[in-house]
Amino acid sequence: MALQGVKMKEGPTITSRPRSLFNLHELLVAVGFTLVNAGAHLVWSPITEYWQYVATTLMFVTLLTFWLTKEWRRLESFVTKFYCVAVIFDIFAEGLLQPFHHCTFDNVMCTGRLFLVFFVGWFILHPIEWWVAGRSIRAR
């Protein structure tokens, strides 16, 4: 939607079709979020004081929230955005509840399963989103 009297800069629009069927950037962002999640569990492993859990949890949540806000417009897939938000909530909940279920190996394995579910969902749903986006652009 252009304003009257203001010439809009030419360039790709937000609703443009993705360059390829599978977006490597989105996959790398998801892998990065997974690595930060696993790293958080490894950082929490030797901690004994609850305030340390809270402080490191807030640090990780702030870091990932900042990263997600920087990447939000570049992420094309709903699945990737949903996964990143889910990782932020997972780190927040895990960090605050860590003293009550302190088992690093199980938590890291859960992080791996969470990523595996994301990857399968992304692998199946991303082409469908890509196809739907292409059809909605052509319909206009």
Image (cartoon, rainbow, N blue to C red):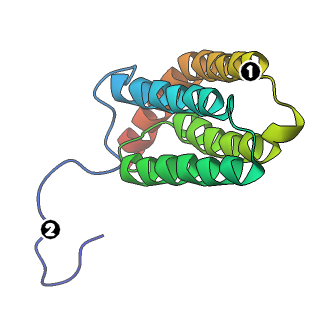
Q: For marks 2 and 1, give the one nearer the viewer.
A: 1
Residue 106 sits above or below residue 51 on the image: above
Q: Quadrant of residue 58?
A: bottom right
Q: Secondary structure at mark 1?
A: helix
Question: Horizontal placement of 36 versus 20: left or right?
Answer: right
Q: Which residue is mark 1?
A: 110
- Compared with 140, 32 (above or below) is above
Q: Which mark is residue 39?
A: none
Q: Where is residue 52 drawn, in percent x and y?
A: 67, 49
The residue at the point 28 percent across, 28 percent down is 19
Q: Quadrant of the N terminus?
A: bottom left
Q: Which residue has dot 2 on it?
A: 8
* Up/down of 98 relative to 2, above or below: above
Give percent across and percent down for residue 2: 24, 73
135 relative position to 58: left or right: left
| Residue 116, quarter of the rendered image | top right
Q: Of 10 and 63, which appears nearest the observer?
A: 63
Q: Residue furthest bottom?
A: 5
Name the amino acid type tagged 2: Met
Q: Quadrant of residue 10?
A: bottom left
Question: What is the x, y in percent for residue 46?
Answer: 67, 30
Image point (60%, 34%), residue name: 40
Q: Is residue 49 above or below residue 131?
A: below
The front one of 115 and 106 is 106
Q: Residues within 10 Å of mark 1 (few under 14, many from 20)?
A: few
Could you say where residue 65 lies in the image, as x and y percent from the top left? 51, 52
Q: CA distance from mark 2 to mark 1?
A: 47 Å
- The residue shown at (63%, 48%) is 57
